[in-house]
């Protein structure tokens, strides 16, 4: 998990700099390497929403829920 956290911080820093494309690419690579980690899928959903890609965002949230993302109903309320 330390590698996931480290790369997620890099993705967030890219977002803060306005580089949505690079942040998306980082999270896509993470999801490819760690498909069973719900936090990665939830982060991809958030970035997809920022990009206006609601279809990807919904799919990633659904995947995160299947993988055990806690309190998804509360988050969506």
Image (tube, helix red, strand yellow):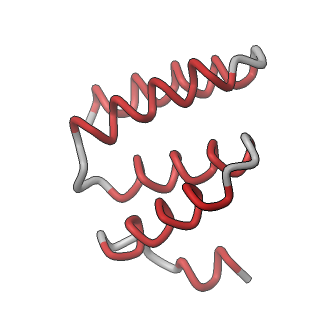
The vertical placement of 55 against 75, above or below, is above
The vertical placement of 27 against 17, above or below, is below
> Which percent across, then down, holds residue 18?
78, 19
Quadrant where the N terminus sits is top left
> Which percent across, then down, holds residue 65?
41, 74
Q: Toward the viewer: 45 or 74? A: 45
Q: Toward the viewer: 33 or 7? A: 33
58 left or right of 70? right
> Which percent across, then down, holds residue 40?
40, 47
The vertical placement of 71 against 53, above or below, is below
53 left or right of 23? right
The vertical placement of 53 against 4, above or below, is below
Quarter of image, res 12 = top right
Which residue is at 29% across, 69% downward? 67
Which residue is at 28% across, 26% downward? 3
Which residue is at 47% across, 60% downward? 60
68 left or right of 65? left
Which residue is at 57% across, 25% downward? 23
Quarter of image, res 34 = top left
> Which percent across, then down, holds residue 41?
42, 53
């Amino acid at each position: 998990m330390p590698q996931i956290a480290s790369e997620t911080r890099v993705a967030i820093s890219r977002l803060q700099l306005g580089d949505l494309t690079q942040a998306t690419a980082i999270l896509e690579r993470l999801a490819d390497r760690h498909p069973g980690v719900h936090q990665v899928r939830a982060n991809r959903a958030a970035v997809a929403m920022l990009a206006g890609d609601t279809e990807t965002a919904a799919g990633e949230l659904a995947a995160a829920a299947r993988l055990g993302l806690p309190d998804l109903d509360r988050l969506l309320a």
